[in-house]
Amino acid sequence: MGNSLFKVKYVVTCNESFQILHDAAIAVEDGVITYVGDKDKVPYSLGNFDYVFDIKGGVLIPGLVNCHVHAAMTLFKGVADDLPLKRWLEEVIWPLEDKLDSKSLIYGNYVAIMEMLSSGTTTFADFYFFDELIEAVKVIPIRTVATLPLLDKLPNSEKFWSRLKNVKSYEHKISEVPGGLISLALGPHAIYSCSEQLLREVLMVSDKYSIPVHMHVSETKYEFDLVKKEYGLSPVKYLDRLGLLNKRLFAAHCVYLDEGDVQLLSDRKVSCVHNPSSNLKLASGIMPLYDLLKKGVNVCLGTDGSASSNSLNLLSEMRLTVLLHRGVRLDPSFPTAKDALLMATLNGAKALGLDDKIGSIEVGKRADFVILDGRSLHLLPENNIVSNIVYSSSPSDVSYSVVDGRVLFENGKFVGLDSENVLSLFNELAVSIWKSRGG
Ligand SMILES: [Zn+2]
């Protein structure tokens, strides 16, 4: 990995004081940021560095953190575009998942990771097929929270109990990936797919081993009404009754929130993952972002899987977040571009329990960052860099994506990967799965 120096025009640190540095440099030693500051005051001679990147016009930001993804669902992009969530899952996605094999899942993961790196994401929380994700990350070393999916209310789903009982073996699998790039989360799928007994066990294991919990929570009106009917409580209050609302939970969606739910999420320090594209495309609804942020809830961003949102581009998710909530509330002052950038960086790192490592550009943190081409037409003029990043940038502006000090994407190329070959095989596999569905 060695030592590297990156000289750029701007560093948007996303630190607590949201410092923006001009004509700056960051030094990286063995994957750790050791200097952030004036590019002419670097406290080491250039001879100390194995690599020096002098990136004219570069705009360096923390790598984006995508907190809710089903990565290998890239295989199902475009196949069930016009169904509501329940029918989408039961009629199309679950039957197709029976046709997946290891190879297609690994290629589905490769392409998801490529899409994320090329649009500025350097960390993602996955929620899908565990083993194949690990294999893919061994090849493309992006930072990942690998969620262990758990559910027991569907036919043949009792086997998931053994996953929970063998959680240590999954931690072991993760530890085989070098550099501590992968961490584990427990993934009770949703209230409607998990028994109360399973959810209680999840809490016990999460408490015992301090493992975060990643769960779909109150995504649709259907789910909200079902839980209310069955338990007499909103999904949020039901989870609170079980003790699952706590700082280790990052809850995807949180679209339908009842009286008092926002306060509860805030009191219990739950993080909520906003997935605007997915919620809009599936016509699920809109998260009450204003209420959550005003009550101090940590809200971060996700794209959800490519089968529901059709894109893993977190740059556009930031833009959509701002536009959507301004349109809903008729208030041009909320949220701001800065709010959106923090949701996609530091807030995401906090949600995943990784803010001691990533989420901002600071000495001592791991070197996960992205450099945008500040000379591109989208990022000029340079009067308001943060505004340009959120409202105007596109994946074509991503020049470098760096994870743990390693350049994984550079000027349109994936380092060490035959991307043409990967994409062509991925396409073959995805087309043949879709063709084999019968009916
Ligand atoms: Zn999801």
Image (tube, rainbow, N blue to C red):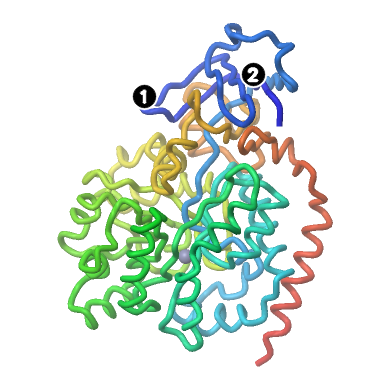
Q: Residues within 10 Å of mark 2 (few under 14, many from 20)?
A: many
Looking at the figure, which quarter contains the C terminus?
bottom right
Q: Report the residue at 43% width, 56% height from top.
A: 276
Q: Report the residue at 58% width, 43% height from top.
A: 122
Looking at the figure, which quarter contains the N terminus?
top right
**18 w.r.t. 129: above or below:** above
Q: What amino acid is at disc 1?
A: Ser
The single residue placed furthest to the bottom in the displayed view is: 439
SS category of the residue bearing label 1: loop
The quadrant holding residue 229 is bottom left
SS category of the residue bearing label 2: strand
User: Residue 4: horizontal and vertical position, in percent?
Assistant: 68, 23
First along the sequence among labels 1 and 2: 2
Q: Report the residue at 35% width, 70% height from top.
A: 201
Measure the C-alpha gap from mark 1 to mark 2. 22 Å
Which residue position holds label 1?
17
Q: Which mark is residue 68?
A: none
Q: How many marks?
A: 2
**50 w.r.t. 416: above or below:** above
The answer to whether mark 1 is within 8 Å of ligand 1 is no
- Of 361 and 292, which appears nearest the observer? 361
Q: Residues within 10 Å of mark 1 (few under 14, many from 20)?
A: few
Which residue position holds label 2?
7
User: Residue 181: horizontal and vertical position, in percent?
Assistant: 58, 46
Q: What amino acid is at disc 2?
A: Lys
- Of 256 and 147, which appears nearest the observer? 147
